[in-house]
Image: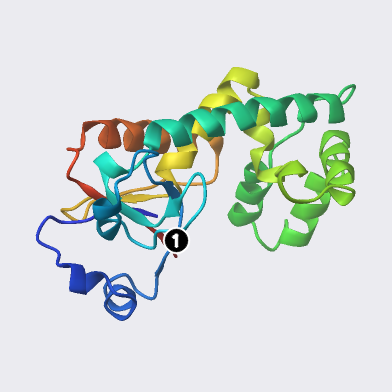
Amino acid sequence: MIVCLPDGLSAQALVTAQLDRRLAGSGMSPRFWATPDLRWWQRGQLLGLQTGRPAYCAGGPVRLLDLAGMRHAAGVGAGIRYEVWRRVVHGTRPAIPWPTYLARHLVSPFRYPRERAEEDFHQQPRVNAMRMHNAVSYGAHRLPLEDLEVFQAGSVAYQHYCAANAVCGDALLTPDGRKLAPTSDALCHRVTYLEQATRYLDTVQPHQRLLAVAL
């Protein structure tokens, strides 16, 4: 989750113990890139700053975060990943995404148990092609099965999706306590969330502090 911190929240409230109490056991997650031209006196304004290029951090003022760089890098990586996916699934028919099977199971859990839903999803040739690739691949070379639906939307759509997701995460909490999040795992609901979160983040002031937390 991406948390937009209230202006009045003190630095003391952001230490781990205080944060855990405020966000129900959540912990800071290094997700953002610090801006490449960060000065030494600005380092104290960033949370959980790590070394490296790019330097990851859990958050800080928007003016010190390289959100544009994150989006660009995620989009480039997605383009490469899409080409790998295209070769892996070549010759297979479009597959029904997992959220469709899950929704059917949730409507009738006894008549259509989860085990049956998982079996039906995994039996599809395109899904098997992705699983076989993942069986012999590691790390960033793996193809996320949860991205199947957006893979099938095309290369440009997948790049835009990954670029937006790099900054917006899975949910966003505004300073007034309003939570933006997808209503389900379906791609249409995920896209709606990314539209809302991207628009919101594009309007925040440079001094607004963002914090990434793992729930």
Quarter of the image where one finds residue 156: top right
Q: Nearer the viewer, residue 63 or 187?
A: 63
In the picture, residue 27 is in which quadrant?
bottom left
Q: Is residue 59 left or right of residue 116?
A: left
Q: Residue extending furthest left?
A: 8
Q: Residue 3: where, in percent of width, then height?
A: 30, 54
Q: Quadrant of the C terminus?
A: bottom left
Label 1 environment density (alpha carbons within 10 Å; few <14, some 14–19, many ≥20): some
Q: For the point 45% across and 47% down, which residue is it?
A: 169
Residue carrying label 1 = 29
Q: 145 and 37: which one is in front?
A: 37
- Residue 172 drawn at (x, y percent): 34, 49
Q: Quadrant of residue 211?
A: bottom left
**Left or right, residue 25 beside residue 12:** right
Residue drawn at x 24%, y 54% as measured from the top left: 41
Residue drawn at 41 percent across, 55 percent down:
57
Q: Is residue 37 above or below residue 28?
A: above
Image quadrant occupied by the N terminus: bottom left
Q: Which residue does the image show at 76% across and 44% down from the upper left?
A: 142
Total labels: the figure holds 1
Colouring chosen for the image of the structure: rainbow
Determine whether, in the image, residue 129 is placed left or right of residue 193.
right
Q: Vertically, is 50 above or below 82? A: below
Name the residue at the bottom extreme. 17
Identify the secondary structure beneath mark 1: loop
